[in-house]
Amino acid sequence: MAPKWKKQRVNKPVKIKEEEEEKEEDSISDDSYFEEIHKPNQPKYNSFQSQSNSQQAQSPNSNINSIPWKEKYKPESTKDICINKKKLNEVREALSKMIRNESNVKLLVLSGPSGSSKTTTVKLLTNELLPNNDIFGSSLIEYNESENFNNFLNECKYKQNSVILIDELPNIYHIETLINFRNGLKNWIYSDIKLPPIILIVSEFEYDNLDNLNNTSFGVENNLSVETLLTKEITSLSSVKTIKFNSIANKFLNTTISKIIKCEQLNRKVDVELMNRFLFELFQVGDIRSIINNFENWIKFDKKDNIENCQFLRENSLNLFHAIGKIIYSTKTGENGLDKDVLSIDQVLNNYPEKNSNLLSLSLLENYNIYQDGKYDINIAADIVDNLSINDVLGGNGELGIISTRINLSKIEKIKNQPQFMKMKYPRHFKMLKMYNKTWNQIQNYKKYLIEPKLGFINFQTLNLIDGYYIPMIYNKKKRSRVNYNRLGGKFSYIGADDQLTVDEDINIPYEVDQFQVEIDARIQGKEEKNDIEDYLSDPISDSDEGFSSDDELNYLMTQGIIP
Amino acid sequence: MSLWVDKYRPKTLSQLSYHDSITQNLRGLSKSGDFPHLLMYGPSGSGKKTRIYCTLNEIFGSSIEKLKIDVKTFVTSSNRKLEFNVLSSPYHLEITPSDMGNNDRVVIQDLLKDVASTEQVDFSNQSSKRHRFKIVIINEADSLSRDAQAALRRTMEKYSSNIRLILVCNSISNIIAPIKSRTLLIRIPSPTPNEIGKILHNITEREQVQLSSGDVDKFYERLALASNRNLRRALLSYETLAMQSETINISSNQQLINLDWETIIKSMAKDITTSRNVSTIAKLRTTIYELLSHCIPARIILKTLLFDLVDLHHENNKLVEEVVSTGSIFDERLSLGTKSIFHLEGFIARSMVVIDKYIR
């Protein structure tokens, strides 16, 4: 639902092209004539069309439909690519330097949303820069997902005069495969011999599958980006160059689409005004592949009398911060007489990916208090949280939480000219889970390794809640040596919210010597050393406990240089 | 270097110092040499496990104390390896189902079948039919999934000739009725402050703890009450006190050592009462995350916070009534919902509103 003036502006460039079109018409219909002979007619399409649009079925050109447009109008050379020319030149320069070995860049990373012409750019540029004089296929070597990545790289080492393209990634959701992938690239980057240029294409996406509680942070699983895939260690190297692609701007989309319109003689078949309005809506997506597909679909199958009921196959989804912003602050202006609160709720409900609704609810909880820096009645806050809590019980798509937050916040009397100090924050839930797992593991290890079996099992929560606090205090006093026992499971630590996405690389926690951890490590090591497990298990462990504690003291003295 | 809790733990039924009637019953059970499946329940730190081991000691002799830990692995249907610990002696096994997560049904069934299929052979006295079974102790039985409990009930009947189960839990509200009907229920209540006092007094003499002059019994009682009549906790905090200084000051104004997380929650309750505004809610959210990240169960946080609030406002009956009813609403939501942060914060915000209503 765009304002009217915008629609009109878009109309113009397409209209200009109308006249040129007719001149070239003949040659095109010739082409299509040949196609008609070679490609068998697909009756399914024809019958469908005759129902939907009798006019088109009668037209002689209808058989072109057997090839999808995205194949048919694939760019043939670099100048046809639907992309900003500056971006193209940037990639061209980088790649040609790499081919001529003029730069130290060994890995070129192209990242961006899907359908921003990344792959096409690479393929056509390679053809242009390394014209193919070999009869055995192209100078571009593509990685195939089913291959072992490192084997593939090894084979590629000797293929000079070619460009290696990694468009498909190996199974990066398997942690070992991911590490192998990273190491393979690292070895490539660090190697001294001259290697062919390698291009990695990353279609970035966000927040997939955050519902899963086991995801303790933002990593490859839920946020595929260059950083999560390769880690900062690699991306910050000078021999790695990253070029970011953006969604394609309307200007470039228009050029490409009007070419299609021209070739398909669409101006004759369809109401131009309607088509332009449709295209305007479609261009919002910014994904060329999806736009062509949808456009083709619309032209071929849809009833072309009404835009409102046509369905876009790819939704232009809201990202998390947009959605929170809309709910917390509401959209600026109402439209079509709609209340702006209703509108913002509507937009979020329709456009925010439903499977991430848990994340949205958590974010609302984290952020409702930033409205007017929290200077409002607690009754309103209580209502919001109450509804978020019910919302959690209900499950579903978080509708209740979204509606309640917006409506309740709209009841607040606005303070004029009040500057806002608080920023939107990411929910801390995942950070909390990470700490939770750490604590849990330490207590489990304590339970497993340090409690003498003759005392039986002790309940986990007893250990955490009671023993965890008292026992270190007792031990610290009892053992005269200066070892330090920390609270079991670590000290209570502050968990703050971040306003920026932190990429999950192990956060450095200040190193503290914890005697429990030392003893656990010693036990684990001791266990590995003992080959005869049976013998070890029948030994009363209490004996070895004495030995360990005296060992610690000895170790301590030795490390302090008191005993040589 | 063992802790007092472990050092003074009774090993035989005759060493048990309180709940004499229960001890009598257990002695009767052990005399018969055979007993039904048991379900021991009661608050933590009341001596459930101690009583079980004393009974086993009475039946099988001291060889029950030759314990070892085995790490068993189990491969789930999705090919994931699962490790869990089994504590065992020649006569019994002990397992904790919470180690097994969602697969508890399969794991327990597998394990029990394994144990049950090998009949216990006692060469020492072949003539009698005694001890032809193995004991399986299941800790934290209330954390067993419904699924696992249903499976357990069948196993109990099928292998009842070879296996005796002892289920241990804090409350039987989560145990399904068929299991309750197939077991002998034994409730172990918390010891009274007086009984705890006697045990503490015994330790004072044996360990020669120096106490300052004053009403010793009053001090013991205070310690017992501060520990919620949890004997384990009372002993640990007493030992901590004893370690802090040569002589323990037992006068009533002397601070006892409170648990760190309880102190945190207490200050939360104070914040809720004193500064009732939106930014306090946001500040307390950080505190809740802090507690949650330390594996402190959300229900315990809610319960402790509620009782602290009630303590702070005990003179205002209307207010207390309303806070408690709010607490119960959010307690229910905690068990229905998935993410506890919503409900804890909901409770905080609502109780602020309630307090705001009565205190102006």
Image (spheres, rainbow, N blue to C red):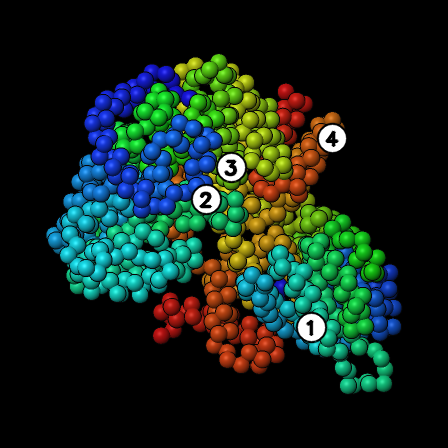
Report x, y in % for residue A108. 24, 50
Q: CA distance from mark 4 to mark 1?
A: 53 Å
SS at circle 4 = helix
Q: Which mark is residue A208?
A: 2
Residue A491 circle label: none
Residue plotted at (83% across, 78% down): B130
Report the residue marked by disc 3.
A354
Amino acid found under the numbered disc labelled 4: Glu
- In the image shown, does A182 or A170 lie closer to the viewer? A170
Circle 4 residue: B321
Earlier in the chain: of badge 3 and badge 2, it is: 2
B37 lies left or right of A291: right
Q: Disc 1 designates what residue?
A: B114
At 29% across and 38% down in the image, what residue appears?
A32
Q: Which chain does the numbered disc 1 sit on?
A: B
Q: Judging from the image, what secondary structure is the residue with disc 2 in? A: loop
Tags 3 and 1 touching, CB below 8 Å: no
Q: Chain of mark 2?
A: A
In percent of width and height, residue A543 lies at 58, 76
**Place of residue B289 in the rendered image (x, y in percent of width and height, measured from the top left):** 53, 42
Q: Residues within 10 Å of mark 1 (few under 14, many from 20)?
A: few
Task: Kindly identify which chain the residue marked by label 4 belongs to.
Answer: B
The kind of residue on which mark 1 rests is Asp
Q: Give the alpha-carbon distance from disc 3 to disc 1, as whole Å.
A: 46 Å
Vertical relation: A11 (above or below) A228: above
Residue type, label 3:
Glu
Q: Nearer the viewer, residue A111 or B294?
A: A111
- Badge 2 and badge 1 both on one subunit: no
Mark 1, secondary structure of its residue: helix
Q: Looking at the image, is B45 positioned above or below residue A534?
A: above
Mark 2 or 1, closer to the camera = 2
